[in-house]
Image (cartoon, rainbow, N blue to C red):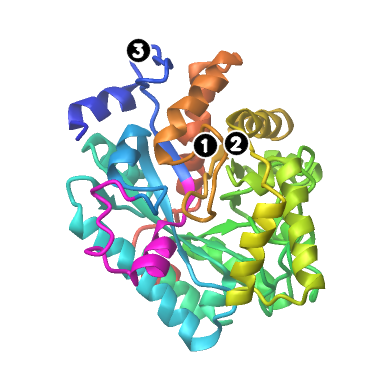
Amino acid sequence: MKTAAFFDSMVAMKSTPSLDGHESDLLVIDGHNDLPWALWDKADRDLHRLDISHHQECLQTDIRRLRKGHVGAQFWSVYVPGSIRGARAVEEVQKQIQLVRNMCERYPEHLTFASTADQVRGAIRDGRIASLLGAEGGNCIDNSLTTLFRLRRLGVRYLTLTHAENVDWADSATDAPAVGGLTAFGQEVVRAMNRCGMIVDLSHVAETTMNTALDVSETPVVFTHSSSRALVDNPRNVPETVLTRLRTNGGVCMVTFVPTFVSQDVSDWYEEALQAARDAQIKWGTEASEKFWASWNERHPQPHATLGQVADHIEHVRDVAGIEHVGIGGDFDGVGSMPLGLEDVSCYPALLQELAARGWSRNELRALTGDNILRVLGDNEPPWPGSDNDYC
């Protein structure tokens, strides 16, 4: 285990970072990790069945690898599939929140719950990994501002407005357009998030939704796990015109490692597979779909994304949006495979080494790894004292 003194020295940033692949004084604040979903999917949320204090072959995340990867804070995604709606979606997101709380209670020497920028800094000073909450998919609020405020009181700091499917009040990037971005209620959701200190996350949403949310939001937004559409033409990525708007809004695009979003070859391969599945009338999530994908992979081996391609996206976002508007949102345990060189959460130092070799300064790396998202976190905290009920 890393000592508190070790983490203090990294926070202080008193020496030039040693980016030789072994040690760094830079801690990463990652915007999106799906470990809670993986624990739900693979172990029914049972931390005894999958003890993350030990290496787990079926996961990309565990405590030892988080430490090796110099992760100082992690936004854990409390994701509920878009197919789950209504009261059950609200129930499941609260179970996911409790799972993250249970993780912190089970591993208190490593993880501590945090919901503010100051709490993140305090956790790092104490040598622990700050654990924050991000709710992925607006279906989890069941069209209710009261539920939104309840999630905020439970410590949720961002809401991804949609997942892969539309919600009643917002269009997703990967569904047929239904409402033209945000409905009037969707715009009120954004305003309510601004009021109560919940960050608007625009990953997964349609371009129309991105622009309407940016029109409405009075606080900085985030893309917690998206990359550049100019480099990979995928609807999950952020177009140039939207990246440019982050300069005015103050928000951050946290570049993801998902191969489909960082490699055009992988994106094209995946789209070809999806079209073949549609043509064969394969229903997603069935035994037939599992057999289809196994057969497809055998006949059409998936190309590989690379660490260098992720670095390309990070540099492009920096060049278009500005150094104050780029971050990291790996999306580990959200997909089956990651780019070569970024296979799990231990690999962040290799990415920073690549960027340093490309000429990134220590201050630029600090902005990328944590300073930018800490600023956004702080800018989305209500400026007045009092109980949660005062702003919710």
Q: Which residue is mark 2?
A: 326
Q: Position of residue 302 (x, y in %)?
A: 67, 47
Q: Residues within 10 Å of mark 1 (few under 14, many from 20)?
A: many
The amino acid type, in three-letter code, at marker 2 is: Val
Magenta region includes residue 52: yes
CA–CA distance in space, label 3 to label 2? 23 Å
Magenta region includes residue 344: no
> Residue at 59% of width from left, 13% of height from top?
359
The amino acid type, in three-letter code, at marker 3 is: Ser
> In which image quadrant can residue 295 be found?
bottom right
Secondary structure found at label 1: helix
* 278 to the left or right of 325: right
Q: Are marks 2 and 1 in contact (CB under 8 Å)?
A: yes
The amino acid type, in three-letter code, at marker 1 is: Asn
Q: Position of residue 167 (x, y in %)?
A: 66, 76
In the displayed structure, 123 sits above or below 105; it is above
Q: Quadrant of the C terminus?
A: bottom left
Of the numbered discs 2 and 1, the one sitting upstream in the chain is 2
Q: Which residue is mark 3?
A: 15
Of the numbered discs 3 and 2, the one sitting upstream in the chain is 3
Q: Are marks 3 and 1 in contact (CB under 8 Å)?
A: no
Secondary structure found at label 3: loop
Q: Position of residue 373 (x, y in %)?
A: 50, 42
> In this orientation, which residue lies closer to the viewer: 151 or 255?
255
In this rendering, the count of numbered labels is 3
Tell me which segment is drawn in magenta. 31-56
CA–CA distance in space, label 2 to label 1? 7 Å
User: Comparing marks 2 and 1, which lies closer to the viewer?
Assistant: 2
Q: Position of residue 186 (x, y in %)?
A: 67, 73
